[in-house]
Structures are given as C-alpha cells and as structure tokens.
Image (cartoon, grey):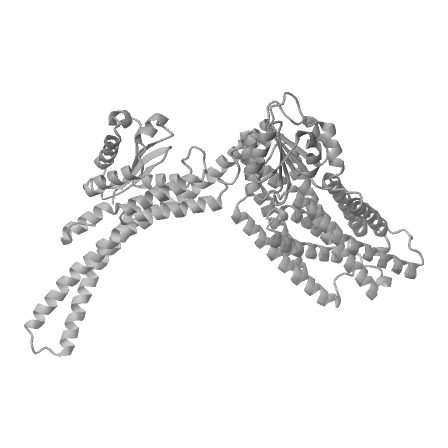
Amino acid sequence: MHPHLQNIAIIAYVCAMGLALAHLVQRQALVHRLALLATLVGWIAHTLALVVLAIEIGGPPLGTLPHAVSVVVWVVVLLEMLVERQSGVTVLGAFVMPVVVVLSLRSSVARPVTLAPVLGNAWIWIHIALALVGIAAFVLNFAGAIMYLLQERQIRHKRPGRFYHRLPPLQTLDRWTYRTLALGFPFLTTGLILGAVWARTAWGSVFAFDPLAFFSLVAWVIYAGTLAGRAAGGWHGRRAAYFAIIGFAALVVTLGAGLFLPGRHGA
Amino acid sequence: MPLFAAGISHKNAPLALREQLAADEDKVREILRDLVGGGMLREAVILSTCNRVEVYGVADVPGEARAIAFRHLCRQRGVQSASVEGLLYTHAEEEAIRHAFRVAASLDSMMIGEPQILGQVKDAFALAQGCEAVGPALHTLFTQAFAVAKRVRTETEIARHAVSVSFAAVELAKKIFAKLAGRAVLLLGAGKMSELAAKHLVEQGAFPIYVVNRTWARAQELARALSGTAVPFEEMGTALAAVDIVITSTGAPAAIVTRDMVARVVRGRGTRPLFFIDIAVPRDVEPGVDALPGVYRYDIDDLQQVVDANIRERLREAQRAEALVEREVAKFRARLGDVEVIPTIVSLRERLEEIRAGEVRKTLARLPDASPETRDALEALSAGIVNKILHAPITKLRESSRAGAHRSWLALVHELFGLGRRS
C-alpha cells in the first residue's frame, strides 16, 4: 500500500512545485490556492505512507536513510505550510517545493540501505531525529537565502523585475535566514555529538571514516562559521546568504553520500 | 429599458473643452431636473470630473435621447454643441454597461488604476439619487459598477504599484526595510519633492526626522512641518550615522555625500541597511556608494525607471482586469434581462387572475345552491386552465431574456394581453 501512497505524495509535490512556480511568475490567486491544495494532498498521502511504513516495520521509519530523508521532507512540508500560513509570504512554496521534490526523488531512487544493526538503539533514534529537524530548518534557511539574493539583486541593480513586488523586504528575509540558522544549528550540533559519542562506544573511534559523518561535519563547520560570523562579526545580507547556500550544498552532498556511497551509516 | 452612456473624456476631448463642460454640483442638479423632470430621460446620472463629462441615462426612445441629453448639457454650459458633436461618444445597452464598469474600475482613467475616480462616480450617483433622477435600472447598474470596481481593485494589481517618483521611493524603502515605523530619516536640502517623499515616509511611521539645509531658517521651517529636528550643516556626518533613509535634494554643484563618508558610516552600522534617495540634479550622492555593502542608492533616473516598470506592470494587470469586467458585463446583462422581464410576468399573472376570479364569481352567482365541493372544483378548474395557458409564454419570456432578445417579446405580450404601459 505505502509505495502507492508514496507515489501519490511525490506526484502531488511535483504538481505543487509547478503551481507554486507558476504563481511566482503569474500571481493568480487561484493558482496559489491550487498549489496549497496540492501540497496538502501530498503531505496527507505522505503522512499515511509513513504511518503504514511504521506499522510494517514496527518502529519509527528512520531505520534506513531513504526513510529518514522521507521524514525530513515530511517535516519540511509541514513547516513550509505553517510558516506560509503564518507569515503570509505566498511565494515561499516556489522556493521550498523544488528542494522537497529533489529530496523526495532522491530518497525514492536510492538503494534501500539499512542502517547498520549496531545502530539499533534509542540513542541513535534521537541522533537521527535531531539531525533531521536540523536539516528541515536548513531547507527553509536555504529558501530564505535564495529569496534574499534575488530581491537584493533586483534592488541593487535598480531593475525591479517580476519578483520585486512578490518577494518580502530584504530585512525580513535577512532576519528569516538568521532565525532558521539559529533554530537548525543546535539540533544539528546535538545530533552530531550524539552520533560521535555513539561512534566512539560502538567503533572505538570518532573519526573512523564514514562519508556521511565526514560531510555532515563539513556542513556543520560551515554553519558554525556562519552563525559565529552573524552573532559576533555582524555578518548579514549577501555574505550570510551565500554561506547559507554553501552550507546547504554541503548538506545535500552529505545526504547524497549517505544514500549512494558505502559507509558505516549504510553497512 | 434602453440604457445609454454619452460623453467626452480625456481620450478624445481637449482640456479646454472639458473645462468648459464640467459642471459643479448645483449645475448638475439643475440639468438632472431638466432632463428627468422634463421627461427627456426616465433616469439619469451625470458624471463631471476634470477628465470626463458623461451622461448615463435611460430613455423611452433610444438613439435620439442621448444626443438630446448631451445637447442640453452643452447648452447649459454655454458650449456650442457643434464643437462637441464630433468628439461625443455614445454607448448603448451592453456597451454602456461595459463603459460604466470600466470607468468605475479606473480602466478608462488617464493613469490606469488611479483611485479617485471611484469616489467621483459614487458622488455623481449620490447626487443623482438626491435629485430623484435614479430609478431601478441605473440603481442596479451603478451598484454593480461599484462592486466590479472593488473586485478589480482587490483581485488585480492595477492600483498597487507606485506610479510617482516619491511613492516609488517609499515603496523601495518598504522593500528594503521590513517596516518603516521607527526608521530615522535625514533630509539633505529642502526641495519640494523631497518634502513630499519625507511626508509619505512620516505617514508610514518613520521617526525621527532630521533636516539639514544650508539656510538655517529653511531647515527649521521644514523640520517644523515634518515634526522633525533641524541639524546644522556641519553635523551632517553625525546625522548620517544615525539614520536609515537619506533624501537629498540640494542645489550643490557637486556631490556632497562622498563614498568615503558613507564607507566610514557603514562600518559602524551592523546589519542595518542605508538607503539614499537622491532627487537632486546634479546628484548629491556619489554613485560609488553603490558598491558598499548594505547601501542602496537611487537617483532620479533610477526612480523613474522603477516608475516605468510599475506602469508596465499596471498595464499587464489591466488586461486581467478587462477580462474580469467582460465576465461581469455578461453576468449583468443576464440579470438586467430578468429585471426587465419580471414585472411583465407579474402583471401578466395578475391580469389573468383578475379575469379568472371575475368569471368564477359570476358563475357562482348564478349557482346559489352549489355545494362547497362544487365551488372548490370550479376554483381548481379555472386556476388549472390559467396556469396551463401561462406556462408557455412565461417560459418563452425567461428564455428570451437570457438570450438578450426579450424586447420584442415583451412588447408582443403587452400588446396581446392588453397590459398597458410598461414600467
């Protein structure tokens, strides 16, 4: 049953992405409503798919990386709907849904690696869950950074284009990227520490090479640097946005490494 | 109900003629009384603004009435009607409905989407109502025109983007700063345009306002007008560090805000952007400041470019608005058809009921011994016949009104059943 639900969810997300992008360009209220509807339909199908999956495997669907990524997507879509509703930024979907679609497609084509049995422990669930919430926040961080750069470019070049009226003000977007960074970072950090502690007890070494662990450390360093730069160095605006994008690229590589490269996360 | 709209507007008539024709409220009242009281028109609304003078009316005899109505208006305003004849446009029926909707929705305005016209149409309508010149047809038409105008306003963006330089500057400030409330503004120089822009910012909650000007008295005067503070020219650098938005409009021959000055200020600002609105020619702010992080500078040409882009955006939105108006016109035509047909259906029913009841009364008078059952049967029989007879003509009338071809049918029904003058 759940593969069908999964497919419905992905198709609905793809529709939602198309409609959200059309809304960004065309700004028809009807298109936006349809995009919201498609997102909601996708999310409900996705929820059911995850529930069915959890019943089938008798536990939270975090045991394999594709499942875990699927949960990330689920959290991101939920957050996107809530934030869009609350902030009234109707173009948000156009920037979040493409990421959602890429992640969904990736997790559905990846080999269904099972996380090493040694990882089957309550601590590890917390490690995964925290890391996932962190990643979800960074997806929003990424979307905010892209919007910031688009809007900043239009204002700096004195050529207000199609999106000028549709994107939120620069300061709002800048504050947005700061907040999502400040939200995601503690989750990612705690998730990584738990993972490292576990790795030490399980394998005797924190630094034993594992592609996912390595790249997530890279992403963490980038985000840590950005946060430090923002909090202490007064970084903001374009520089902060560029770093948000680099950090997110590292996260995508991390997930890709986990999904496609052999390593301890997918023994 | 022959509906028409006749008039002249900025589209075809020169300002001089519009000025001559435009009438004040008293004059409009007088003309309305002549037109409606004198029996030329059954209903009338006169819209008189600096961009258009138009008569919306309902007349028994279409065609002639519009020309007569407008000729009367010309006579009243002392304008040779011959000089207007060639410029006069007249719209009848559906065209008139469309015209009323487009005018109210500001699609026929000189600047598409400008907000005043709707208020002017509402005033014109209220004035005509006050003179009892408005009947059911114009009442329906104008109420609907207001609703259409509101829809156009909320569902399209024809009125949303700034089309003047000073508003474009404010709009930009809003796209840089999330809110303008509490943003500090510095006015460099005391030009009219910068004062206007500053006023818009103050309306949006910008505070405090500093004014720097070479003439101290003028600085103080402007500061008072904006509830701001005058700052001596020498302290311009300090003021620059304290504000978020700078509006410059001095007559200085060269830039007075240099890149170095701004670079020094920016270092201490943290994450706050700095926005220069340079309305002066020659420019007051060195274009080089553009390269500094968090600094945005718009000169008069840049702002004009924004305005042009916004006007193009309005024109794009206007196409969507036209489509919306078109749908509303079609809906309204169908409704108007019903409105016209219903009184006839009602009087047709009344007429036949009258005949039926009369005949039943006469018959019963000749049958004093009739049992209650017989009486009931007679009533039921006659009512049944009347309903059967009425069914076909009523259906036909409703159908024809939906097709917009009910006029001749109405006339025929009135003629055949002797219903008298329609109202």
Camera-nearest residue between B227 and B245: B227
- Quadrant containing the N terminus of chain A in the rendered view: bottom right
Camera-nearest residue between A225 and B32: B32
Q: Is residue B272 above or below residue B391?
A: above
- Residue farthest to the right? A204
Q: Is residue A40 visible?
A: yes
- Residue farthest to the top? B253
Q: Is residue A193 left or right of residue B91?
A: right
Residue at image point 9% right, 72% down: B364
Q: Is residue B399 visible?
A: no
Indicate the position of residue A28 as horizontal and vertical percent values.
53, 45
Residue at image point 77% right, 43% down: A234
**Image quarter for residue B348?**
bottom left
Camera-nearest residue between B223 and B363: B223
Indicate the position of residue B192 as horizontal and vertical percent values.
53, 30
Residue at image point 74% right, 28% down: B260
Indicate the position of residue B97 as horizontal and vertical percent values.
33, 42
